[in-house]
Amino acid sequence: MAEEHTALTVALAQLKLAAQKLELNSGIHKMLSQPKRSISVSIDIRLDNGAIGVYNGIRVQHWDVRGPFKGGIRYYPNITQDEVTALSMLMTWKCAIADIPYGGAKGGVCVDSKKLSKHELERLTRRYVSLIVEYLGPHRDIPAPDMYTDAQTMAWIMDTYSQLKGYMVPECVTGKPVEVGGSEGRTEATGRGVIHCVKEAAQNKNLKLKNATVAIQGFGNVGYHAAVAANEIGCKVVAVSDSTGAICNPNGLNPVAVLAHKEKTGTVQNFKGCINITNEDLLETECDILIPAAMENQITCKNADKIRAKLVAEAANGPTTPEADKCLHEKGIVLIPDILANCGGVTVSYFEWVQNLTREHWTLQEVNEKLETKMTKAFDDVYALSQKEKSDMRTAALMMGVGRVANAIKVLGLWP
Protein backbone atom coordinates (compact mmCIF):
# COMPACT_ATOMS: atom_id res chain seq x y z
CA MET A 1 0.00 0.00 0.00
CA ALA A 2 1.38 3.41 -1.00
CA GLU A 3 2.34 5.82 1.76
CA GLU A 4 0.19 8.93 1.87
CA HIS A 5 1.27 11.53 4.36
CA THR A 6 0.45 15.18 4.81
CA ALA A 7 2.40 17.34 7.23
CA LEU A 8 -0.62 17.59 9.55
CA THR A 9 -1.50 13.88 9.62
CA VAL A 10 2.11 13.06 10.48
CA ALA A 11 2.28 15.78 13.16
CA LEU A 12 -0.97 14.58 14.76
CA ALA A 13 0.19 10.95 14.65
CA GLN A 14 3.45 11.95 16.34
CA LEU A 15 1.55 13.87 19.02
CA LYS A 16 -0.70 10.84 19.60
CA LEU A 17 2.34 8.58 19.99
CA ALA A 18 3.93 10.94 22.53
CA ALA A 19 0.62 11.32 24.39
CA GLN A 20 0.28 7.54 24.68
CA LYS A 21 3.85 7.10 25.88
CA LEU A 22 3.45 9.91 28.42
CA GLU A 23 -0.04 8.72 29.44
CA LEU A 24 -1.14 12.28 28.83
CA ASN A 25 -4.48 13.58 30.07
CA SER A 26 -6.94 13.34 27.16
CA GLY A 27 -7.98 16.98 27.59
CA ILE A 28 -4.39 18.24 27.33
CA HIS A 29 -3.82 15.96 24.32
CA LYS A 30 -6.85 17.54 22.63
CA MET A 31 -5.65 21.05 23.53
CA LEU A 32 -2.24 20.40 21.97
CA SER A 33 -3.74 18.87 18.82
CA GLN A 34 -5.03 22.23 17.62
CA PRO A 35 -3.55 25.73 17.59
CA LYS A 36 -4.50 28.43 20.04
CA ARG A 37 -5.09 30.87 17.20
CA SER A 38 -5.18 30.88 13.38
CA ILE A 39 -5.26 34.20 11.53
CA SER A 40 -6.19 34.38 7.83
CA VAL A 41 -5.89 37.65 5.92
CA SER A 42 -6.31 38.96 2.39
CA ILE A 43 -3.29 40.99 1.31
CA ASP A 44 -4.01 43.59 -1.37
CA ILE A 45 -1.10 45.46 -2.97
CA ARG A 46 -0.49 47.74 -5.91
CA LEU A 47 1.73 45.96 -8.45
CA ASP A 48 4.40 47.77 -10.44
CA ASN A 49 2.20 47.77 -13.56
CA GLY A 50 -0.64 49.52 -11.70
CA ALA A 51 -2.80 46.41 -11.29
CA ILE A 52 -3.96 45.17 -7.88
CA GLY A 53 -2.57 41.89 -6.60
CA VAL A 54 -4.56 39.90 -4.02
CA TYR A 55 -2.80 37.22 -1.95
CA ASN A 56 -3.87 35.02 0.94
CA GLY A 57 -1.82 35.21 4.13
CA ILE A 58 -1.89 33.12 7.29
CA ARG A 59 -0.31 33.07 10.75
CA VAL A 60 -0.89 30.08 13.01
CA GLN A 61 0.01 30.36 16.71
CA HIS A 62 0.13 26.91 18.31
CA TRP A 63 0.91 27.19 22.04
CA ASP A 64 2.65 29.91 24.04
CA VAL A 65 2.56 28.32 27.48
CA ARG A 66 6.40 28.34 27.72
CA GLY A 67 6.91 31.77 26.15
CA PRO A 68 6.05 33.98 23.14
CA PHE A 69 5.12 32.36 19.84
CA LYS A 70 8.10 31.85 17.52
CA GLY A 71 8.30 30.68 13.93
CA GLY A 72 9.14 31.46 10.35
CA ILE A 73 7.20 33.13 7.56
CA ARG A 74 7.36 31.49 4.14
CA TYR A 75 6.34 32.82 0.71
CA TYR A 76 5.22 29.89 -1.39
CA PRO A 77 2.38 29.36 -3.92
CA ASN A 78 0.97 26.13 -2.46
CA ILE A 79 0.80 26.94 1.25
CA THR A 80 -2.16 25.40 3.04
CA GLN A 81 -3.56 26.01 6.51
CA ASP A 82 -2.96 22.34 7.41
CA GLU A 83 0.71 22.62 6.45
CA VAL A 84 1.24 25.81 8.45
CA THR A 85 -0.63 24.33 11.42
CA ALA A 86 1.60 21.25 11.39
CA LEU A 87 4.76 23.36 11.19
CA SER A 88 3.62 25.54 14.09
CA MET A 89 3.07 22.39 16.16
CA LEU A 90 6.55 21.08 15.35
CA MET A 91 8.01 24.46 16.34
CA THR A 92 6.39 24.13 19.77
CA TRP A 93 8.10 20.78 20.37
CA LYS A 94 11.37 22.02 18.86
CA CYS A 95 11.58 25.02 21.21
CA ALA A 96 10.76 22.80 24.19
CA ILE A 97 13.45 20.25 23.23
CA ALA A 98 16.02 23.05 22.89
CA ASP A 99 14.73 24.34 26.24
CA ILE A 100 14.26 27.89 25.03
CA PRO A 101 11.32 29.99 26.30
CA TYR A 102 9.16 30.02 23.18
CA GLY A 103 6.01 28.44 21.83
CA GLY A 104 5.52 27.47 18.21
CA ALA A 105 4.08 29.51 15.36
CA LYS A 106 4.32 29.57 11.57
CA GLY A 107 3.13 31.91 8.87
CA GLY A 108 3.06 32.35 5.16
CA VAL A 109 1.72 34.03 2.07
CA CYS A 110 0.46 32.14 -0.98
CA VAL A 111 2.67 33.77 -3.60
CA ASP A 112 5.35 32.88 -6.12
CA SER A 113 7.94 35.33 -4.86
CA LYS A 114 10.06 34.84 -7.98
CA LYS A 115 7.34 36.56 -10.02
CA LEU A 116 7.33 39.73 -7.92
CA SER A 117 9.82 42.57 -8.05
CA LYS A 118 11.71 43.59 -4.92
CA HIS A 119 9.41 46.61 -4.52
CA GLU A 120 6.32 44.40 -4.82
CA LEU A 121 7.73 41.98 -2.22
CA GLU A 122 8.36 44.89 0.13
CA ARG A 123 4.78 46.15 -0.25
CA LEU A 124 3.45 42.61 0.23
CA THR A 125 5.50 42.13 3.41
CA ARG A 126 4.54 45.46 4.94
CA ARG A 127 0.84 44.98 4.13
CA TYR A 128 0.88 41.46 5.61
CA VAL A 129 2.47 42.72 8.83
CA SER A 130 0.01 45.61 9.10
CA LEU A 131 -2.89 43.13 8.95
CA ILE A 132 -1.62 40.93 11.79
CA VAL A 133 0.37 43.48 13.81
CA GLU A 134 -1.91 43.30 16.87
CA TYR A 135 -0.96 39.63 17.23
CA LEU A 136 2.80 40.23 16.85
CA GLY A 137 5.40 41.66 19.21
CA PRO A 138 8.59 40.81 21.14
CA HIS A 139 6.58 39.30 24.00
CA ARG A 140 3.77 37.89 21.88
CA ASP A 141 4.91 36.48 18.52
CA ILE A 142 8.35 36.86 16.94
CA PRO A 143 8.64 35.96 13.21
CA ALA A 144 11.77 34.67 11.44
CA PRO A 145 12.84 33.81 7.88
CA ASP A 146 11.68 30.62 6.20
CA MET A 147 11.23 29.32 2.66
CA TYR A 148 11.73 32.17 0.12
CA THR A 149 12.05 34.85 2.81
CA ASP A 150 15.36 36.21 4.10
CA ALA A 151 17.10 38.83 6.22
CA GLN A 152 15.78 41.61 3.98
CA THR A 153 12.21 40.41 4.52
CA MET A 154 12.81 40.49 8.27
CA ALA A 155 14.20 44.04 8.06
CA TRP A 156 10.96 45.15 6.35
CA ILE A 157 8.92 43.44 9.08
CA MET A 158 10.98 45.10 11.81
CA ASP A 159 10.64 48.53 10.22
CA THR A 160 6.89 48.16 9.62
CA TYR A 161 6.25 47.04 13.21
CA SER A 162 8.50 49.81 14.55
CA GLN A 163 6.85 52.52 12.43
CA LEU A 164 3.42 51.42 13.68
CA LYS A 165 4.64 51.48 17.31
CA GLY A 166 6.47 54.79 16.94
CA TYR A 167 9.93 53.60 18.05
CA MET A 168 12.51 51.03 16.96
CA VAL A 169 11.76 47.50 18.17
CA PRO A 170 14.54 45.22 16.85
CA GLU A 171 13.44 42.41 19.20
CA CYS A 172 10.12 42.02 17.32
CA VAL A 173 11.74 39.76 14.70
CA THR A 174 14.84 37.57 14.28
CA GLY A 175 16.99 36.66 11.31
CA LYS A 176 17.58 40.35 10.54
CA PRO A 177 20.72 41.78 8.91
CA VAL A 178 23.50 42.35 11.47
CA GLU A 179 23.42 46.08 10.64
CA VAL A 180 19.98 46.44 12.25
CA GLY A 181 20.33 44.10 15.23
CA GLY A 182 20.79 40.67 13.68
CA SER A 183 23.00 38.11 15.40
CA GLU A 184 26.39 36.89 14.31
CA GLY A 185 26.21 33.25 13.25
CA ARG A 186 22.46 33.19 12.49
CA THR A 187 22.81 32.27 8.81
CA GLU A 188 24.88 29.15 9.46
CA ALA A 189 23.19 28.19 12.76
CA THR A 190 20.90 25.40 11.53
CA GLY A 191 23.62 23.64 9.53
CA ARG A 192 26.15 23.93 12.36
CA GLY A 193 23.57 22.68 14.86
CA VAL A 194 23.05 19.53 12.78
CA ILE A 195 26.77 18.76 12.97
CA HIS A 196 26.86 19.31 16.74
CA CYS A 197 24.23 16.57 16.97
CA VAL A 198 26.22 14.38 14.59
CA LYS A 199 29.29 14.73 16.83
CA GLU A 200 27.35 13.56 19.89
CA ALA A 201 25.66 10.69 18.02
CA ALA A 202 28.99 9.52 16.56
CA GLN A 203 30.51 9.43 20.02
CA ASN A 204 27.65 7.27 21.33
CA LYS A 205 27.89 4.97 18.30
CA ASN A 206 31.71 4.78 18.47
CA LEU A 207 31.91 6.20 14.95
CA LYS A 208 35.21 7.96 14.24
CA LEU A 209 34.61 11.31 12.56
CA LYS A 210 38.09 11.64 11.10
CA ASN A 211 37.54 10.91 7.36
CA ALA A 212 33.96 9.73 8.01
CA THR A 213 32.06 10.05 4.74
CA VAL A 214 29.07 12.38 4.51
CA ALA A 215 26.33 12.68 1.85
CA ILE A 216 24.06 15.73 1.93
CA GLN A 217 20.78 15.97 0.01
CA GLY A 218 20.05 19.65 -0.51
CA PHE A 219 22.67 22.37 -0.97
CA GLY A 220 20.77 25.44 0.14
CA ASN A 221 21.68 27.45 3.21
CA VAL A 222 21.34 24.54 5.66
CA GLY A 223 22.98 21.88 3.50
CA TYR A 224 25.89 24.11 2.56
CA HIS A 225 26.70 25.15 6.13
CA ALA A 226 26.32 21.56 7.33
CA ALA A 227 28.89 20.55 4.69
CA VAL A 228 31.32 23.26 5.80
CA ALA A 229 30.88 22.34 9.48
CA ALA A 230 31.34 18.63 8.66
CA ASN A 231 34.65 19.42 6.96
CA GLU A 232 35.76 21.43 10.00
CA ILE A 233 35.49 18.37 12.28
CA GLY A 234 37.45 16.16 9.86
CA CYS A 235 34.62 14.50 7.93
CA LYS A 236 34.83 13.98 4.18
CA VAL A 237 31.83 15.22 2.18
CA VAL A 238 31.49 12.78 -0.73
CA ALA A 239 28.12 13.76 -2.25
CA VAL A 240 25.83 16.80 -2.38
CA SER A 241 22.73 17.69 -4.39
CA ASP A 242 20.31 20.45 -5.29
CA SER A 243 17.00 20.43 -7.17
CA THR A 244 18.80 19.84 -10.49
CA GLY A 245 20.62 16.68 -9.44
CA ALA A 246 23.56 15.43 -7.41
CA ILE A 247 27.32 14.92 -7.61
CA CYS A 248 29.60 12.37 -6.00
CA ASN A 249 33.33 12.04 -5.41
CA PRO A 250 34.46 9.20 -3.09
CA ASN A 251 37.69 11.14 -2.43
CA GLY A 252 35.76 14.11 -1.06
CA LEU A 253 34.81 17.53 -2.40
CA ASN A 254 35.21 21.13 -1.29
CA PRO A 255 31.80 22.64 -0.35
CA VAL A 256 33.05 26.22 -0.85
CA ALA A 257 34.22 25.42 -4.38
CA VAL A 258 30.96 23.59 -5.14
CA LEU A 259 28.95 26.63 -4.00
CA ALA A 260 31.01 28.91 -6.26
CA HIS A 261 30.35 26.51 -9.16
CA LYS A 262 26.62 26.45 -8.38
CA GLU A 263 26.41 30.25 -8.22
CA LYS A 264 28.14 30.47 -11.59
CA THR A 265 26.26 27.69 -13.44
CA GLY A 266 22.97 27.36 -11.52
CA THR A 267 23.62 23.72 -10.59
CA VAL A 268 25.98 21.57 -8.51
CA GLN A 269 26.21 19.12 -11.41
CA ASN A 270 29.21 18.91 -13.74
CA PHE A 271 31.57 19.94 -10.95
CA LYS A 272 35.18 19.09 -11.74
CA GLY A 273 36.30 15.70 -10.44
CA CYS A 274 32.77 14.52 -9.63
CA ILE A 275 30.32 12.20 -11.34
CA ASN A 276 26.71 13.28 -11.84
CA ILE A 277 24.10 11.17 -10.03
CA THR A 278 20.42 11.61 -9.11
CA ASN A 279 18.99 12.77 -5.80
CA GLU A 280 17.67 9.23 -5.34
CA ASP A 281 21.18 7.82 -5.90
CA LEU A 282 22.57 10.19 -3.28
CA LEU A 283 20.26 8.85 -0.59
CA GLU A 284 21.50 5.33 -1.32
CA THR A 285 25.18 6.31 -1.51
CA GLU A 286 27.52 4.28 0.65
CA CYS A 287 28.49 6.69 3.44
CA ASP A 288 28.82 6.92 7.20
CA ILE A 289 26.52 9.92 7.66
CA LEU A 290 23.49 10.90 5.55
CA ILE A 291 22.02 14.38 5.96
CA PRO A 292 18.66 14.97 4.21
CA ALA A 293 18.48 18.77 3.96
CA ALA A 294 15.95 19.18 1.15
CA MET A 295 12.24 18.31 1.05
CA GLU A 296 9.90 16.17 3.13
CA ASN A 297 9.13 12.48 2.47
CA GLN A 298 12.49 11.65 0.81
CA ILE A 299 13.22 8.44 2.74
CA THR A 300 10.21 6.15 2.36
CA CYS A 301 9.37 2.46 2.60
CA LYS A 302 10.50 2.19 -1.05
CA ASN A 303 14.12 3.17 -0.43
CA ALA A 304 14.67 2.75 3.34
CA ASP A 305 16.08 -0.75 2.80
CA LYS A 306 18.67 0.72 0.44
CA ILE A 307 19.99 3.35 2.88
CA ARG A 308 23.59 2.38 3.66
CA ALA A 309 24.52 5.14 6.11
CA LYS A 310 25.27 4.34 9.74
CA LEU A 311 23.77 7.64 10.90
CA VAL A 312 20.98 9.84 9.48
CA ALA A 313 20.63 13.46 10.65
CA GLU A 314 17.44 15.18 9.52
CA ALA A 315 18.34 18.75 8.60
CA ALA A 316 15.07 19.13 6.65
CA ASN A 317 11.60 19.00 8.17
CA GLY A 318 9.96 15.59 7.79
CA PRO A 319 12.32 13.93 5.27
CA THR A 320 11.55 10.44 6.63
CA THR A 321 8.09 8.84 6.58
CA PRO A 322 6.83 6.93 9.65
CA GLU A 323 7.13 3.58 7.84
CA ALA A 324 10.73 4.34 6.85
CA ASP A 325 11.45 5.37 10.46
CA LYS A 326 10.63 1.86 11.64
CA CYS A 327 12.70 0.29 8.87
CA LEU A 328 15.80 2.35 9.69
CA HIS A 329 15.44 1.63 13.41
CA GLU A 330 15.18 -2.12 12.74
CA LYS A 331 18.32 -1.93 10.59
CA GLY A 332 20.22 -0.36 13.49
CA ILE A 333 20.65 2.99 11.75
CA VAL A 334 20.69 5.86 14.26
CA LEU A 335 18.34 8.65 13.17
CA ILE A 336 18.57 12.14 14.69
CA PRO A 337 15.03 13.55 14.18
CA ASP A 338 14.31 16.94 12.63
CA ILE A 339 12.88 18.49 15.81
CA LEU A 340 16.25 17.90 17.47
CA ALA A 341 18.76 18.04 14.59
CA ASN A 342 17.62 21.31 13.03
CA CYS A 343 16.79 23.36 16.13
CA GLY A 344 20.05 25.32 15.83
CA GLY A 345 18.30 28.01 13.81
CA VAL A 346 15.64 28.79 16.40
CA THR A 347 18.27 28.56 19.14
CA VAL A 348 20.37 31.35 17.61
CA SER A 349 17.14 33.25 16.90
CA TYR A 350 16.59 33.10 20.65
CA PHE A 351 20.14 34.43 21.17
CA GLU A 352 19.34 37.31 18.78
CA TRP A 353 16.17 38.13 20.70
CA VAL A 354 18.06 38.17 24.02
CA GLN A 355 20.75 40.43 22.53
CA ASN A 356 18.07 42.81 21.22
CA LEU A 357 16.19 42.91 24.53
CA THR A 358 19.40 43.79 26.40
CA ARG A 359 20.83 45.93 23.56
CA GLU A 360 23.98 43.80 23.48
CA HIS A 361 25.88 42.32 20.54
CA TRP A 362 27.74 39.05 21.05
CA THR A 363 30.78 37.97 19.05
CA LEU A 364 30.60 35.08 16.60
CA GLN A 365 32.70 33.02 18.99
CA GLU A 366 30.26 33.66 21.85
CA VAL A 367 27.28 32.71 19.68
CA ASN A 368 28.92 29.52 18.39
CA GLU A 369 29.99 28.44 21.88
CA LYS A 370 26.51 29.00 23.28
CA LEU A 371 24.99 27.15 20.30
CA GLU A 372 27.22 24.13 20.84
CA THR A 373 26.35 24.07 24.56
CA LYS A 374 22.60 24.21 23.82
CA MET A 375 22.68 21.60 21.02
CA THR A 376 24.86 19.20 23.03
CA LYS A 377 22.55 19.46 26.04
CA ALA A 378 19.44 18.92 23.88
CA PHE A 379 20.96 15.86 22.19
CA ASP A 380 22.15 14.37 25.47
CA ASP A 381 18.73 14.87 27.08
CA VAL A 382 16.92 13.15 24.20
CA TYR A 383 19.49 10.35 23.96
CA ALA A 384 19.26 9.64 27.70
CA LEU A 385 15.46 9.44 27.45
CA SER A 386 15.68 7.11 24.43
CA GLN A 387 17.95 4.80 26.43
CA LYS A 388 15.63 4.90 29.43
CA GLU A 389 12.53 4.21 27.30
CA LYS A 390 14.36 1.78 24.98
CA SER A 391 12.93 3.77 22.07
CA ASP A 392 14.20 5.39 18.90
CA MET A 393 15.41 9.00 19.05
CA ARG A 394 12.30 10.47 17.39
CA THR A 395 9.94 8.96 19.96
CA ALA A 396 12.17 10.22 22.77
CA ALA A 397 12.37 13.71 21.24
CA LEU A 398 8.59 13.88 20.89
CA MET A 399 8.11 12.69 24.46
CA MET A 400 10.49 15.35 25.70
CA GLY A 401 8.99 18.20 23.66
CA VAL A 402 5.34 17.33 24.25
CA GLY A 403 6.03 16.46 27.89
CA ARG A 404 7.63 19.81 28.70
CA VAL A 405 4.73 21.73 27.12
CA ALA A 406 2.10 19.54 28.82
CA ASN A 407 3.81 20.00 32.19
CA ALA A 408 3.74 23.78 31.76
CA ILE A 409 0.00 23.63 31.06
CA LYS A 410 -0.55 21.50 34.19
CA VAL A 411 1.45 23.88 36.38
CA LEU A 412 -0.24 27.04 35.10
CA GLY A 413 -3.76 25.62 34.97
CA LEU A 414 -6.58 27.09 32.92
CA TRP A 415 -7.86 30.65 33.13
CA PRO A 416 -10.48 31.69 34.11
Image (spheres, helix red, strand yellow):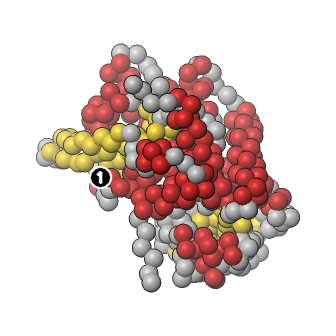
Q: Using residue 295 as the reference point, say whether residue 186 is left or right of it.
A: right
Q: Between 292 and 278, which is closer to the camera in this rendering? A: 292
Q: Using residue 26 as the reference point, say whether residue 212 is left or right of it.
A: right
**Image position, residue 63 (x, y; %):** 46, 39
* Quarter of image, res 130: top left
Quarter the C terminus occupies: top left
Task: Kindly identify the residue that appears in the image at 25 percent across and 48 percent down.
Answer: 56
With respect to residue 299, does 83 lie above or below?
above
Q: Is residue 298 visible?
A: yes
Q: Between 325 and 27, which is closer to the camera in this rendering? A: 27
Which residue corresponds to mark 1? 110
**Image position, residue 24 (x, y; %):** 55, 48
Q: Using residue 183 as the reference point, say whether residue 382 is left or right of it.
A: right
**Image position, residue 255 (x, y; %):** 66, 61
Q: Amino acid at mark 1?
A: Cys
With respect to residue 239, does 159 lie above or below?
above
Task: Kindly identify the residue that appears in the image at 42 percent across and 27 percent down.
Answer: 415
Q: Is residue 249 visible?
A: no
